[in-house]
Amino acid sequence: MDKSFPLTGWGSLAVHGGHKQDPNYAHLVPIYASSTYVFDSAEQGMKRFDNKEEGYIYSRWGNPTMTEAEDKIAALETFGLNTEAKGILHASGMAAISTLMLSALKPGDKIITHFSLYGGTEELVSKILPAFGITAIIADLRDLQKAADIIKADKAIKMMYLETPANPTIQCVDIEELSALAKQYNLVVACDNTFATPYLQQPFRYEVDYIVHSTTKFLNGHGTAIGGILLGRDIEQMKTRITKIHRTLGGNSNSFDAFLLIQGIKTLEVRMERHCHNAMEVAHYLEAHPVVAKVNYTGLSNHPDHYTAMKQMRHPGAMLSFELKGGLQAGIDFMNKLKMCVRTVSLGTCDTLLSHPASMTHYSVPKEEKEKYGITDGLIRMNVGIENLQDIITDLEQAL
């Protein structure tokens, strides 16, 4: 594509963003299956190692396939905004979050975050980081005054970490208000944008410093590769300190997974439109069902975070959860009766995926801990897929 041509549509950017013409004129970026790259001379090698010449050295540090995925996602997260960002592709979302935490924090620092985080993130901040002298304060960040009081009282808090919508209760927090509060106290602000994707929500719009994604989910969209990305607005910091820590920790992606990610992103807009349409209809169906006690979907006006979601998201999204009146056994029975929808613990793929946290992801978590985070025995998490809506509802009906 001629770089002088101005792309005005999100879908066009998803297809063409980040692409550079291959030297051999391949239509799509090739899978660069090479661990290392050669130099024309010793002097060129010296310049590349000294960051005085751009070019590839070793695939743990990056290669052309990975670069295109990084540039494409950075372009989508900044589309229409007066800001730039650099992305660093990782082997997983958790690798990206780990790089972020170990780059931005030091022993003695604290993180303020909220309830209902992704299980891996919660384990990182509660069980892994404390060994490095980094601890977390978990609070209901939907109460802005409470958040302000906590931050004001503790000078050790250096980062605010948000995940919205959160997993698995679909709780939302106000990115704009919380980011503004954090900036008053010079906190670093990071946001996990996995559930929303840049198509539905752009945290950089609200002066967030860093965004993380599990690219495994909606960005890839087909369940074919694990991956993650860390994006930052401080380009110099991303190119120096954070790049150095990322490379040293070794949580790099690879060219094959990056290739699959690039192809998935190209259809993100059309997939999300179908996901979102189906999710809204399924939420209304479940809300009216006699054995369903509660539906957690921010598109429903009775959800406590409905206003917040509508304020910062293009659409409430593809994720919802619902509680069955019969509790644990009802959840198990429902899962066992599914015929088309898939029993699995991931999300973001084209097919409808359902999981039962009490018997799966949170099975080992004490009941009182689960309930504190809104995870009841009868809670079902649902990634509403892009199948024909009637087929999704028919399968739910027979299983319920």
Image: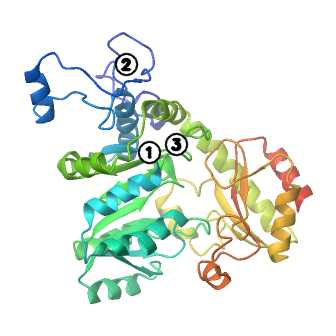
Q: Position of residue 111 (x, y in %)?
A: 34, 74
Is residue 386 depicted above or below 108 in this figure?
above
Q: Which residue is mark 1?
A: 91
Total numbered badges shown on the rendered structure: 3
Whether the residues at callouts 1 and 2 have beta carbons within 8 Å, the answer is no
Q: Position of residue 324 (x, y in %)?
A: 80, 72
* Residue 149 seen in render: yes
Q: Which residue is mark 3?
A: 219
Q: Which mark is residue 118?
A: none
- Label 1 to label 2, Cα distance in Å? 29 Å
Q: Nearer the viewer, mark 1 or mark 3?
A: 1
Q: Which mark is residue 1?
A: 2
The residue positioned 79% from the left and 63% from the top of the image is 286
Scheme by which the image is coloured: rainbow
**Which amino acid does the dot numbered 3 rest on?**
Leu
In terms of sequence position, does the residue under pointer 3 or pointer 2 come before the other?
Answer: 2
Tell me the crowding category of disc 1: few under 14, some 14 to 19, or many 20 or more residues within 10 angstroms, Cα based: many
